[in-house]
Image (cartoon, grey):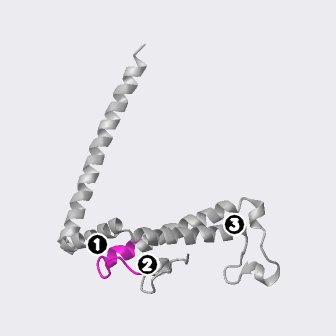
Amino acid sequence: MAEPTQDAGAPGFWADLIRPYRAGQGTVARTLAWIVGAGFSLWGAYDLWIWLHGFGALNRPFLDGALARIPVLRTPISGSLAIAVAVAAGAILLVAWLLKRPWLADLLIETEGEMKKVSWPGREEAWSATKVVSVATVAITAVLLVYDLILTQVMRLLTEYAI
């Protein structure tokens, strides 16, 4: 029996990964989520690469001569680099795949819609609110400091004369 062929109009994995779910909606929130997800993926892969440097067998370059290093970075092309690049690519693909899930995409679209409804304070209103919060924070800190000093002295007196 012949293998069923994929319809020419049906998107493949890569085309489906690139085509956004509900295009034109929530673009700012989804772009920020993509940037943050890719950034964390790269950061994690970099930390993995640093950790893998501790294994001597993974530090040896694959090739000899001029091709043994990445030209601009002067980093040896080694097993630790290959593993880190593979993990980074997989993590970025996972981020792209997750951002295509309807539940997450709808959440980001709705979040962006709600953020557009927020009435943001003006510059002077924000500055006056910042001053109020700063003064209240300093006042509460001072009160807690006084209570702490008093309780410390009381506890010191109780422990000195307890026996």
Residue 13: image location, x then y, percent: 48, 77
Q: Where residue 161 sits in the image (x, y, percent)?
A: 40, 17
User: How dense is the environment of label 3, judged by Cα within 10 Å: few (below 14), some, or many (20 and up)?
Assistant: many
In this picture, residue 45 sits left or right of residue 53: left
Where does the magenta region start and end?
Answer: 18-33
Q: Nearer the viewer, residue 9 or 80?
A: 9
Which numbered disc, 2 or 1, marks the residue closer to the eye?
2
Amino acid type, residue under disc 1 in the picture: Ile
Position of residue 148 measured from the top left corner of the image (x, y, whole percent): 33, 37
Q: Which mark is residue 109?
A: 1
User: Circle 3 is placed at which residue position?
Assistant: 80
Instruction: Using the image, determine if residue 110 lies above or below residue 156.
Output: below
**Three-letter amino acid code at the position of disc 2:** Asp
Element carrying mark 1 = helix
Tag 2's secondary structure? Answer: helix
For discs 3 and 2, the disc positioned in front in the rendered view = 2
Rate crowding at label 2 as few (under 14), some (14 to 19) or many (20 or more) other CA atoms within 10 Å.
few
Give the quadrant of residue 152. top left
Note whether 44 is above or below 68 in the view shown. above
| Residue positioned 37% across, 26% down in the render | 155
**Mark 2, residue position:** 16
Q: Choose top left, top right, bottom left or bottom right for residue 88.
A: bottom right
Query: Image check: 100 left or right of 59?
Result: left
In the image, what residue occupies the spot 77% across and 78% down?
68
Quarter of the image with the C terminus is top left
Discs 3, 2 touching: Cβ within 8 Å = no
